[in-house]
Amino acid sequence: MNDTTEATDVSEGQARRVRVVLVDDHRMFRAGVQAEIGETETTGVEVVGEAGDVDQAVTVITATRPDVVLLDVHLPGGGGVEVLRRSQSMMGDAEQPVRFLALSVSDAAEDVIGVIRGGARGYVTKTITGIDLVGAIFQVSEGDAVFSPRLAGFVLDAFASTDAPPVDEDMDRLTQREREVLRLIARGYAYKEIAKQLFISVKTVESHVSAVLRKLQLSNRHELTRWATARRLV
């Protein structure tokens, strides 16, 4: 009787093992997530690869074909949406689908809607606990959609309308990271505060602001604030 029970437990554990790739441009954050979820025998999650930018992510995902990709929205090289686009293009209609769960510090509606439209099965913020993250990984691996409670409303509102949202060509010129910097500038954050919040240098913040000003053909942060407020980005 005991032998049978043990064999059943092992079989169920093997059936519920999920292979995961972590995609985030902060190495320390990836290490923290792996420490939380990577105890395979306990959680059933096996971390089979990591990446810190779009090119690395596409390479690792296509090489390992994980069950689930934990995907940050803001990444060097084009952001999470670009990872989705390129990965799906390269893998085509694979027999075993790779499913994507966005894991981001951002709770902005356009970020949530952008990656869901790009093909992600869910979106949770980095305030999620390790236990809840493991649960979300398993749900997504089984084809379910998972969202942090506040974010679910964004998705419902976006997809409730049959009318396609208007295309904002100016917004489309900006990368995900530039949009995040723009939003914080519009909220009145100083460069040092933005750098601390996004885990980047002040010089990198300055470079992003310069790029945004150039792309939008604006002159200063006051004009940026008015532009962002008009589009309800603040």
Image (cartoon, grey):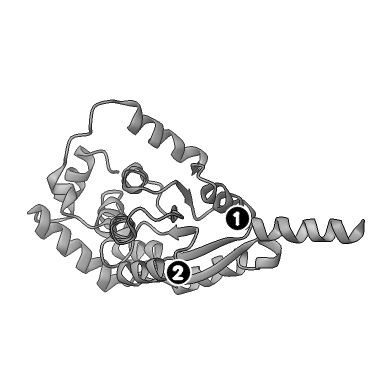
Q: Amino acid at mark 2?
A: Thr
Q: Nearer the viewer, mark 1 or mark 2?
A: 2
Say which quarter of the image contains residue 11.
bottom right
Mark seen at residue 3 = none
Estimate the x, y position of residue 58 in percent, counting from the top left. Answer: 34, 67
* Residue 104 seen in the figure: no
Secondary structure, mark 2, is helix
Residue in the image at 34% along x and 42% along y: 113
Residue position for label 1? 134
Does 174 sit above or below residue 76?
A: above
Q: Give the camera-side residue of 149 and 221.
A: 149
**Callout 2 crowding tier (Cα within 10 Å): few <14, some 14–19, many ≥20:** some
Q: Give the camera-side residue of 152 and 44.
A: 44
Residue in the image at 48% along x and 51% along y: 125
Identify the image quadrant of the N terminus: bottom right
Residue position for label 2? 64
Estimate the x, y position of residue 75 in percent, counting from the top left. Answer: 33, 64
Q: Amino acid at mark 1?
A: Val
Mark found first going from the N terminus, 1 or 2: 2
Identify the image quadrant of the C terminus: top left
Estimate the x, y position of residue 205 in percent, counting from the top left. Answer: 26, 66
State left or right for residue 13 relative to residue 63: right
Estimate the x, y position of residue 213 in percent, counting from the top left. Answer: 13, 58
